[in-house]
Image: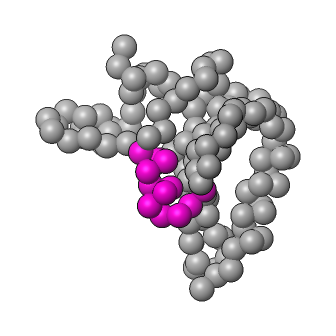
Amino acid sequence: MSPRYTYYQQGSPFNEWHRTIDGLGAVDVDLMEVCNKGSCYEPLLLIEHAYDKGQTYKNCTAIKKLAKRSNLPAILIFYTNEMKTFRVKKLAPVEEDIRTVQADTLIRYFKKLHNLHQCN
């Protein structure tokens, strides 16, 4: 099975159309945390996520490169339907091992990024 169907059976209609064009490549950016103060919308964090099937790997090469170029932190999140615990791997600026975190810990991390951000 193609890696693109590891987590879901089909992408969005646009993604499926794009995949039919020879010579092109694309990767979804799953989520980008942004400042929500007024009209700032400054990117704060790049997030790659996947449904947790017990896997220990998801290709995050493009997200890591984007994080490095944009000087943003990036993480990989494996989640389940209950959204109580997550397996999280820091991808950038420094890659770290996967660790299990509670939802409130992940929320605190997101809020910390917002609190540290100064709108221009």
Identity of the residue drawn at 69% across and 74% down: 117
Residue 112 placement: quadrant: bottom right
In percent of width and height, residue 98 lies at 69, 32
Residue 100 in view here: yes
Residue 36, given in percent of the width and then of the height, sits at 65, 70
Q: Is residue 93 magenta?
A: no
Task: State the extent of the magenta-drawn residues as a range.
Answer: 62-73
Is 91 situated left or right of 117 in this image?
Answer: left
Report the side of 103 relative to 88 (left or right). Answer: right
Q: Is residue 74 visible?
A: no
Picture quarter containing residue 34?
bottom right
Q: Farthest residue in the left direction?
A: 22
Quarter of the image for the N terminus: give it. Answer: top left
Q: Point out the image quarter for the C terminus.
A: bottom right
- Main SS class of the magenta portion in the image: helix
Whole-percent x, y for residue 96 in the image: 66, 40
Q: Is residue 43 above or below residue 29?
A: below
Q: In the rendered image of this protein, does residue 102 appear above or below residue 3?
A: below
- Residue at position x 49%, y 57% in the image: 68
Q: Residue at x 80, y 37 (%)?
A: 101
| Nearest the eye: 72 or 7 | 72
